[in-house]
Image (tube, grey):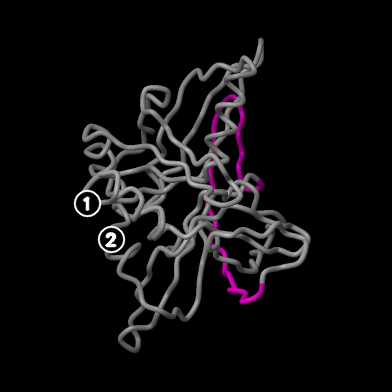
Amino acid sequence: MVDDDPIVHFFHKHLVPILFTVQEGSISRQFIITAFVLSVENHWFLVTAGHCLREIETLKANGTKIISCALIDKMGDGAKHVENIPFAYENAFPEYSPDELEYDYGVIALSRYYCQLLEANNIKPLTEEVWDLQPNKFDFYKLIGVPYELLEITPEYINITSALFDVEPLNKWPNGIAKTSSPQFIGKITLGKGIQNIEGTSGGPIFGFRENPPGTLKYWLVALQSRWRPTSQIVIGCPTKLLGQFLRSRI
């Protein structure tokens, strides 16, 4: 499902893609990374895949300059403001795990100033109720993110389209993918109509759903999407409960 679907708009109250404008020599370009808002003991964090933040640091080390950065918070239900939020990325002390194979987490702590701006546009953080207090079993899973394939970026405008993908969990570690010693979520993606590649959804939340009570769906934050194999359509996700517990220990 793409973002003209009401369900996608519903989950955009948690999703906040980050827009970067960078300068490489005489050429400027823009790109987007998928991110969502996590709350730990009422502290808000922007969360994405660690390798996304690492790639930005690599660009900077090679001479690329960040011209501007913005939080896109206007795509969810109840959004009132269409302007993106200018974001001081380089002053926000982004952090990422050193080993993206094991723990591919990227985290940016949000000041109260940004929390208030996001709240004003109906952004809701994913709290302990969904990342910590989880059932042992789910009925089905879905991933939401911003695939590059659906992005339209021109000098005149940016058209962002999110998508929601069905994910079938796998019990066996797939052949041909480097195995980790840390727990991981493994699943197979069902691509939507007109979508051939989910690249760009790295850092997107993977939700587990359960019908509880009968006729009522509840969802929990299970993992963030980290790796993707297009030939097999397999995704590897890092458990978000581990990230939440780590952040709680630091707080």
The crowding category of the residue bearing disc 1, from other C-alpha atoms within 10 Å (few below 14, some 14 to 19, many at least 20), is few
Q: Is residue 100 left or right of residue 126?
A: right
Query: Which residues, given as a range, are shown in magenta?
Result: 149-172
**Residue 163 painted magenta:** yes
Q: Which residue is mark 2?
A: 128
Looking at the picture, tell me which residue is in the foreground, 130 or 118.
130
Amino acid found under the numbered disc labelled 2:
Glu
**In terms of image quadrants, where is residue 166?**
bottom right
- Residue 80 falls within the magenta-colored stretch: no
Q: CA distance from mark 1 to mark 2?
A: 8 Å
Residue 75: where, in percent of width, then height? 41, 48
| Position of residue 248 measured from the top left corner of the image (x, y, whole percent) | 28, 50
The residue that appears at 44% across and 64% down in the rendered structure is 222
Ranked by sequence position, the earlier of labels 1 and 2 is: 1
Q: Which quadrant is home to the N terminus?
A: bottom right
- Residue 100 is situated, as x and y percent measured from the top left of the image, at 58, 45
Q: Quadrant of residue 196?
A: bottom right
Q: Is residue 79 above or below residue 132?
A: above
Residue lying at 60% horizontally and 60% vertically, measured from the top left: 236
Q: Amino acid at mark 1?
A: Glu
- Figure label count: 2
Marks 1 and 2: CB-CB under 8 Å? yes
Q: Position of residue 175 (x, y in %)?
A: 76, 66
Query: For residue 131, which numbered disc appears in the image?
Result: none
* Label 2 secondary element: helix
Mark 1 sits on what residue?
Answer: 41
Q: Residue at x 57, y 20 (%)?
A: 60
